[in-house]
Amino acid sequence: MNEVITIDGPSASGKTSVAKLVAQRLGIPYISSGLLYRAVALMCLLENVSAEEIEKRLPKHRLELQPTPTQNLVFLDGHEVSEALHSLEVDQVVSAVAVRPAIREYVNQVLRRIPPPFVVDGRDMGSTVFPQARYKFYLTATPEVRAQRRVPERGAAFDTVLSEIIRRDEADKHQSAPARDAIILDTSYLDLDGVVQRVLEHIHPLS
Ligand code: DC
């Protein structure tokens, strides 16, 4: 039982909710890799420095992700910061963090230390971080559908959320290409259970 299942896709494509439910159904942990980029973005905000500067300071910090059955806990220098990772302020800084190759390598190392099996969601989990993964999925949906899904989480106006999603799609596009062997699922007209069902149909029972 040494399986990695990757679920990639653009922001608000539903990948974290899908990864959580698929993992639950399979009885294995899920990992949300975006949380680690968000934690580095939070470091920038806490220290009031740029992504370039935080890259130099990374060796001074300790970043850990601990999966629990219902959520991922993120610890920065021993303090749990999970609740602070989904603000609009973090959304606005995180792309500048995620484009830096040295920061990506740092996050990838944190991820590769986590023992399988697990379901992991992100942008480049199937293409770069876990190219040997047994099952790879890539979720897509229109920007409007994704903004609609994210409005209740952010408590912000639809137009604000939509323009943030469009800006982030553009900023993240280089690390967001699907793996060549990924199964692509358009989720625009599916509800959460429908997407989970499609993913599970592709997965044989893990042994
Ligand atoms: O999935 P998310 O919205 O929580 O991701 C937050 C940011 O991190 C997003 O702007 C893109 C970046 N990210 C990335 O570049 N690579 C990943 N594997 C996961 C996230």
Image (cartoon, rainbow, N blue to C red):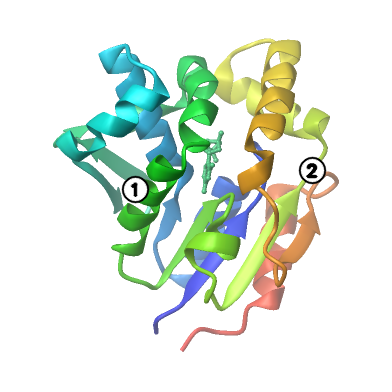
Q: Is mark 2 within 8 Å of ligand 1?
A: no
Whether residue 81 is visible, yes or no, is no
Q: Is residue 18 left or right of residue 98?
A: right
Question: Circle 2 — which element?
Answer: loop
Check disc 2 and report the residue beneath it: 141
For the residues labelled 2 and 1, the Cα–Cα distance comes to 29 Å
Q: Position of residue 105 (x, y in %)?
A: 39, 50
Q: Is residue 70 above or below residue 61?
A: below
- Closer to the N terminus: mark 2 or mark 1? 1
Quadrant for the N terminus in the image: bottom left
Q: Quadrant of residue 184?
A: bottom right
Q: Is residue 25 left or right of residue 52?
A: right
Q: Position of residue 158 (x, y in %)?
A: 73, 15
Question: Circle 1 — which element?
Answer: helix
Question: Residue placed at 48% from the left, 72% from the top?
Answer: 4
- Amino acid tagged 2: Ala
- Residues 176 and 68: in front is 176
Q: Residue furthest bottom?
A: 207
Pointer 1: residues within 10 angstroms few (<14), some, or many (20+)?
A: some
Pointer 2: residues within 10 angstroms few (<14), some, or many (20+)?
A: many
Check disc 1 and report the residue beneath it: 106
